[in-house]
Image (spheres, rainbow, N blue to C red):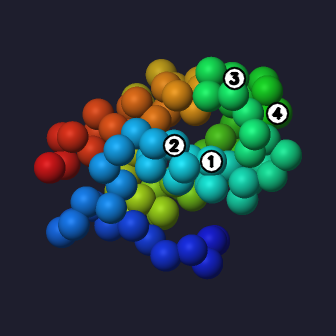
Amino acid sequence: MSSEPKLSVVGVDLIGSSASIESVIRAALATIRPSAVGLDGNADLAQEADLDSAEVMDLVMEIEDRLDLSIPVETTAHARTINELTAGIAVLKQGLR
């Protein structure tokens, strides 16, 4: 796993904005597939980043670790791009407040 500190949703909201969520997703993506870091936000993660299903699950687990939250399967099933994943996590975080 990453040596970067976890960002907790408890107490002070350290990942409040979509830009911050996107940066966490991109950092997690860098761990799984470093060559995909510069992808456009609308690029299909599976195709453009060349992630297989196991790597997608690794990406989700890495994001969960970094944000200290659980991402439902429904959120990841509907998110094919970085922008869609960012939006899904933002909605999820709104429900945690």
Q: Residue at x 52, y 28 (%)?
A: 83
The amino acid type found where label 2 is placed reads Glu
Badge 1 vs badge 2, beta-carbon distance below 8 Å: yes
The x, y position of residue 72, in whole percent, is 38, 40
The amino acid type found where label 1 is placed reads Arg
- Calculate the distance from the C-alpha at mark 1 to the C-alpha at mark 2: 6 Å
Q: Residue at x 74, y 45 (%)?
A: 37
| Number of numbered tags placed on the structure image | 4
Residue linked to disc 2? 22
The amino acid type found where label 4 is placed reads Asp
Badge 4 vs badge 3, beta-carbon distance below 8 Å: no
Q: Secondary structure at mark 2?
A: helix
**Which disc is residue 26 wearing?**
1
**Which disc is residue 50 wearing?**
4
Residue 24 visible, this orientation: yes
Looking at the image, residue 1 lies above or below residue 35: below
Look at discs 4 and 3 and give the one toward the viewer.
3
The x, y position of residue 36, in whole percent, is 78, 41
Looking at the image, residue 82 lies above or below residue 14: above
Badge 4 vs badge 1, beta-carbon distance below 8 Å: no
Q: Secondary structure at mark 3?
A: loop
- Calculate the distance from the C-alpha at mark 2 to the C-alpha at mark 3: 13 Å
